[in-house]
Image (cartoon, grey):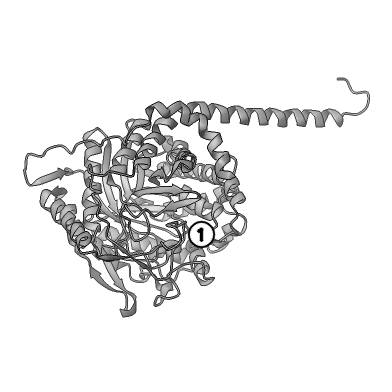
Amino acid sequence: MASFIAWLAVLPLLIAGIGQIVQRSPVGPIPENADPTVLADFGPDFFFGLATAPAHVEDELNDSWLEFARRGKVAAWSNHHKPEDRVKFWTEPEVEVDLVVEAGAKVLRLGVDWERVIPEPGKVDSVALARYADIVKLIKGRGLKVMMTLFHHSAPTWVAAYGGWPEARAIEDFVTFGKLVVDKMGDDVDYWTIFNEPHVYTLLTHCAGAWPPGKEFSMLGALKCFSPFGEYTWSLKNMANAHGQLYTYIHSKRPDAEVGMAHHIGYVVGHNLLDIPGALYNHFMTTFYFVDLIHKQSDFIGLNYYGQEFISGPGPAILSTEEYSDAGRAIYPDGLYHLLMKYHTRFPGSRFMLTENGVSDDLDVVRGAYLVQHLLAIKAAMAQGVKVEGYVFWTISDNWEWADGYCPKFGLVAVDRENGLKRTKRPSFDLFREIATTKVVTHAQANSTWEKVLEGARTGLERPFCRDITKGGMTGAFGIDEPMPRKVVSKDWRYGHYEGPLLADTVGNSIERVWRAAEPKLQQVVARVKAYLAQRKADANMLLQWTQEPAGAEL
């Protein structure tokens, strides 16, 4: 019934745009290079970095995620050795920092955990704050720049207890925390990404209940939450308010500061005809919404891109014809080019950074090609005038991946949890180092990494897959304790070569075109509804005041 109602709601939009629905738009070319061995040259001013976050890597962290995992809400966690240690970034940060230096990166993106600094209302742990400052000093001492995130999918348990980000009081509490961090280490931070993927956090926490504190899920509640008048919208507006306050505060302390965000973008398409409304609505609520709220108080726009999702009903589907990361994200470099171009059109003149891009790939079969092909997508966008200044890869070492636990392996470095967190560099580590130090992608790198994918497909190589594919292909947002085998798919997903399913071609290209035509009118409708409701409220207040006037009062 919900899908039928959603279909009826957007049917006029589809009819209006049906004449424009064609195959996916072509991607831009990669400019030729004077050196015939070089496929893409990013130039001396382009930077390469690596990213991590407190909940992924810090030991001795008694955060909401640890409590959530101990309640059995995190997959692939309790069946791993000393899961609470993560990768000991708190007590042994030099291990990861030295790997970043060895990988040739010049920027390390990390975060400060809100609950570690303020474990309860009004109480500041000055020792923890000083430890964070020491870690930042360590990073700077290794010759790296620091990109600091203040909120990365982890709210304190005491904030969750009063309702979290939908509540306005979270604004003041977070700004208080942010100012503490800025005052303590602001002079050593080169880039600020105040919020990481706020709409992803809000969806999975407040709408789906898949993340801490783990509210009970109901379809009706989720639909209400993910609406223009639900907790999703309230949360993002409160986060935007907090971002604006901290943007102003950081610049008051350091006028030349670089302040932005790390916003998740995904290429979302409908799996079948009835899924088109859901894909359209998802695009409307996620692709630009938060950035629209804060871009005027941002020095750059940070974008996190992992791939595409085929929406089927309430969640993503796994298609047998598509290649995926171990964590269930379809690999689609072309999508990064398309989204960069859309952002360039919507926010002309803006500076962009890829603040996250990466792939979970335990066997390191597709990671090399993934890295190369997404860099080609970025270079093609740059050739069209998009100002992309840097690329930050996720991540250094395998770590705790949210509700998926330790199943997905995103690291350039493998971690042996049974053997004292012993690190082993994957072949992709050397590839990243070659690219980061030379700032070029060569034809040889593109050919060798793609040949590795082809060899896996030819031999029927099975990769560990962290989604249950036995239930009709649906995945939702939930992982499994032990990976399932899934063969490398024989599909050419390289930049500029991708050919998608016919319906996905239609939907993928139509979403932006239909929405671009309909968005102004829909915004007008929403504004009129809000104005109408405000007027009705004012009328009701006036009526109430009139009924309370003493008898005989003048009208």
Residue 511 in picture, x, y percent from top left: 41, 36
Asked whether 166 or 305 is in front, the reply is 305
Residue 543, compared with residue 196, is above or below; it is above
Q: Which of the 4 image quadrants contains residue 400? A: bottom left
Amino acid carrying label 1: it is Trp
Residue of label 1: 211
Marks counted in the figure total: 1
Q: Which of the 4 image quadrants contains residue 130? A: bottom left
Residue 514, compared with residue 320, is above or below; it is above
Residue drawn at the location 43% of the way across and 52% of the way down: 316
Residue 499 in picture, x, y percent from top left: 27, 43
Q: Quadrant of the N terminus?
A: top right
Q: Secondary structure at mark 1?
A: loop
Asked whether 547 or 346 is in front, the reply is 346
For the question of whether residue 249 can be seen, the reply is: yes
| Direction from residue 91 to residue 378 in the image, left or right | left
